[in-house]
Amino acid sequence: CPALAETDFTTASLYATLRAADPPQLPRSADYSVEARHPTPREIELFEIAETMPMLVATQLTSNQDSRPIELTVQVYRGDRYRFRASITNQT
């Protein structure tokens, strides 16, 4: 998706840009995981926390209609400021 390099994502949507690409890149599935770990020295500095503060790291890999990766997201949160919510639905 060559348009990604030229897109201003302060106002544009990543997924709208991907859908408008030629050929369109349609997100079809994502693998998401969350794990706890100790903070890195840089995270201690950025978050202004003690080195014993647990961190939660959420990683998501999104694939397109051809099962090719189109997005990798890694988010780091303070363990005491994270809430995970999910809705579980039976589609049978």
Image (cartoon, rainbow, N blue to C red):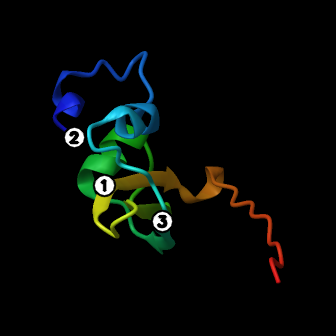
Tell me what residue is drawn at x 33 percent, y 53 percent.
71
User: Is residue 56 toward the left or the right of residue 61 in the image?
Assistant: right
Which of the marked residues, 3 or 2, is nearer the chain's N terminus? 2
Crowd tier of the residue under label 1, counting other residues whose Cα lies within 10 Å: few below 14, some 14–19, many 20 or above: some
Front-lying residue, 41 or 56: 56
Check disc 2: other Cα within 10 Å, few if <14, some if 14-19, many if 20+: some
Q: Name the residue under label 3.
A: 30
In the rendered image, which quarter is residue 17 located in? top left
Q: Which amino acid does label 3 sit on?
A: Ala
Q: Nearest the camera: 47 or 33?
A: 33
x and y, in percent, of residue 36 in the image:
49, 72
Q: Do the residues labelled 1 and 2 touch (CB within 8 Å)?
A: yes
Q: Residue 36 carries which label?
A: none
Q: Tell me what residue is drawn at x 30 percent, y 36 percent.
A: 21
Residue depicted at x 80% and y 64%: 87
Q: Report the mark closest to the observer, 3 or 2.
A: 2
Return the mark for residue 70: 1
Which residue was labeled with disc 2?
1
Q: Earlier in the sequence, mark 1 or mark 2?
A: 2
